Amino acid sequence: MEVFEGKAWISRQGLIDTCIGVEEGKITAVKKILKGDKQTVVDGIILPSALDMHVHFRDPGYPNKEDWKSGSESAACGGVTAVVDMPNTNPFTSDVETFNEKVSLASSKSVVDFGIGVNVEEDLINKSWFDTIPSAFWKLYPYGISSEQYFSYAKEVLGKTKKPLVIHGEHPDHMHNEPLSKLSDHTQNRLVAEPECLASMPSSPHLHVAHLSTLEGLNQMPELATSEVCPHHLLLNLDNCHSLDCKVDPPLRTTADNSGLYDAFRKGKIPILSSDHAPHTIAEKKSDNPPSGLPGVETMIPLMLNEVSEGRLELGRLVNAMSEAPATRLGLNRGKISEGLPADLIVVNMKNSKLIDLDRLHSKSNWTPFQDWAAIFPSQVYRRGELIAENGEIKHEGGGQNLF
């Protein structure tokens, strides 16, 4: 048994001096005093690692943007040991064959554990595999379909599902494509798409709203639904991010939206933190018509740990939002430092704030909107008790497993 000794965040107790015993990938004991075959005294604090339930690792189809190896290594170095990949790869993950192909790719390349989302298409609920495919959730996009189809599909799936329906919460009728000359033009094209969409969505405990971006959208959230927010919608806005590089769906908004969403996040009204890691090549982002998306899985937790260090966010709220809340939303028994759960841990020195350096990041996208922002990266990252990243360097190849 390996024992990690130091201050650790224990659910409902906070940061306490403790010992964590780990065997065969599981936490076997959490006690005040514990002796093992290997004793590791931690320099810093021990937190549950993060589960990012919203990434785009682009594999299959676009491995030049990202693949399961580079994306998962980015995740690991940022303190994320489990991800859920979205279905808009090529081909879309929309049936058993494409699902199994992606699981195979992830199993062969990913250093972090994973789940796979399945795309909502016409007649999904009548597929023979609807009740049996081991997907993390269903994902509904507002692209390429009418608003009637969009809301019809949502109601159909919510009436039959036993797992979350994750929606990209923008109304198809209010997503305009007028030419862009500046970043704010994209925001103008989507000005009311989010609140108009959420106001029309049915209320269901199975509904989950991805990447909330507006205060108006937050105010129109269906009563029983859950939601997530990304660091870029908390920290970036049209005042501090002007370049078309920062084009993202939903768009960046105002400082008022930042403040309103952040306040709701602090209070747990938005329970989950996700990255919406969506990398593209530099050439694509510098083109006259840049695609939407920002890389973020490696910087998400470090940025928010720095927010904790600066006194703008409570540590317990961050831990819950990055670990326990997404696991609970997906029906997974993980995300806490507790006996019997996977030993997914990160070690963090809260005084070790550094500026984000693109040259130290691992995504193939090779850019970040957070260059030179202060961040606190984990010094060690353990997936199921195994050291997979240390001080921004990968220490283990592959080994990721399907969570579902």
Image (cartoon, rainbow, N blue to C red):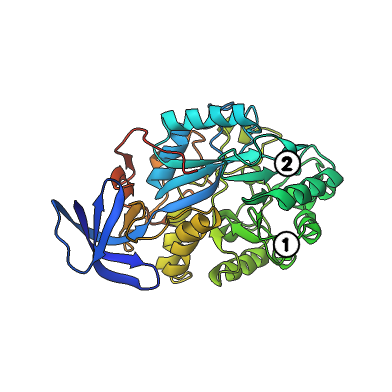
**Mark whose residue sits in front, 1 or 2:** 2
Given residues 109 and 207, the one toward you in this image is 207
Number of the label disc, if any, that sits on residue 194: none
Q: Amino acid at mark 2?
A: Ile
Residue occupying the point 46% across, 39% down: 402
The alpha-carbon separation of the residues under discs 1 and 2 comes to 28 Å
Residue 347 is drawn in which quadrant? bottom left
Do tag 1 and tag 2 residues touch (Cβ < 8 Å)?
Answer: no
Q: Which residue is mark 1?
A: 217
Number of the label disc, if any, that sits on residue 125: 2
Specify which label sits upstream in the sequence, 1 or 2: 2
Residue occupying the point 68% across, 34% down: 128
Residue 268 is drawn in which quadrant? bottom right
Please give left or right for residue 336 compared with residue 1 in the image: right
Q: Amino acid at mark 1?
A: Gly
Residue 392 is drawn in which quadrant? top left
Kindly state the secondary structure of the residue where label 1 is placed.
Answer: helix
Residue occupying the point 41% across, 56% down: 375
Position of residue 178 measured from the top left corner of the image (x, y, whole percent): 82, 42
